[in-house]
Amino acid sequence: MTSPAADPAASAPTPTPTATDAPALGPATGRRIPAAVWVALGIVYVVWGSTYLGIRVVVESLPPFLSAGMRFVAAGVILLGVVAWRQGPAALKVTRRQLASAALVGLLLLLCGNGLVVLAETSVPSGLAALLIAVVPAWVVVLKACSGERPSAGGLAGVLLGLAGLAVLMLPGLSGEVQAGGVVLVVLGTLAWSTGSFASSRIEMPANPFTASAYEMIAGGLAGFGVALLRGEHHGFDPSAVTGRSWAALAYLIVFGSLIAFTAYAWLLHTAPLSLVAAYAYVNPVVAVALGALILSETLTWPIVLGGAIVVAGVCLIVSTERRR
């Protein structure tokens, strides 16, 4: 779980680029959706859904916070370079307050949100992690309600459905089928991610969404290195002992999950119907579960299937209700 520049989990965005922030490529017109939009949608739907599988493969032989730090620092530096190349060095300039805000959001989303998920995936199946994370939109609605924004009836129903599904998804941990500690870590990660997503829309962030995302990733990645040192992940770490598939998965997360998919997402916000773009919130978990079962042979138990279906239904209701407000 990360920001779109880093992960879906996620897929809620951080901070969500608006139509005025995204590249001015022109809105889609007419009823027919251009092929380029479908390609970009496919990237967001599939790539972000596959990042849970990628994380699971990475932590097979790489320490969790050390690998997360490597991923986000690398992606953040590359993104800064791309922004400077495409838009000029001036696009990287931010005020101290904006930089501090981006760092705070990066800590909440990437260190606490994504970091806890990466740690949890050392013991929790990738498909289950994705379904647990899918409840993030429900937490965001709860946070909005706590700030005085009254939720709609559909949004409230979606929250109740999502939380009911979350309860069912936690049964494998309670029954001992997976480590309960890992399930709790994912839930805590979703709360941190939701808080970061909520905060990003209420504090002063860099105006350029790509610049903001780059600073968030660098801050979260550097903090990840710090946690890795505190946990002693560097002791006995031997890069030569890391498998080729873990290195390949890390490279995939950096390039595809953190760079290509986010660029596609930002472009879609400016060119495609919001209903299509927002659908990633309930498509990603389905993709993650399918890939986990097909590639890693993860078991699909009845709590995962039933709880996942309930969560996806709740998220679908929340997304469809919120986009009409």
Image: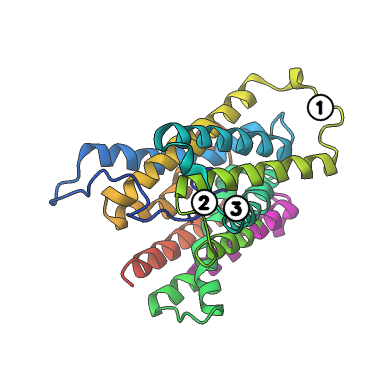
Q: Is residue 292 visible?
A: yes
Report the disc number at residue 10: 2
| Residue 79 numbered tag | none
Q: Of circles 1 and 3, which is in front? A: 3
Q: What residue sits right under mark 3 in the picture?
A: 99
Q: Which residues are magenta?
A: 161-188
Tag 2 and tag 1, C-beta contact below 8 Å: no
Position of residue 170 measured from the top left corner of the image (x, y, whole percent): 64, 60
Residue on which disc 1 sits: 237
Which corner quadrant of the image does residue 278 belong to? Answer: bottom left
Work out which residue is located at the far top of the displayed protein and give it: 240
Secondary structure at numbered mark 1: loop
Mark 2 neighbour density, 10 Å: few (under 14) some (14–19) many (20 or more): many
* Mark 3 vs mark 2, CA separation in Å: 23 Å
Residue depicted at 43% across the width and 35% down the height: 260
Q: CA distance from mark 1 to mark 3?
A: 33 Å
Up-down: is 76 above or below 207? above
Q: Residue 263: which quarter of the image? A: top left
Place of residue 306 in the rendered image (x, y in percent of width and height, measured from the top left): 50, 58
Question: What's the amino acid at mark 2?
Answer: Ala
Residue farthest along the left direction in this orientation: 30
> How many residues crowd mark 3 within 10 Å: few (<14), some (14–19), many (20+)?
many
Look at the numbered disc 2 and give the secondary structure of its residue. Answer: loop
- Mark 2 / mark 1, whichever is N-terminal: 2
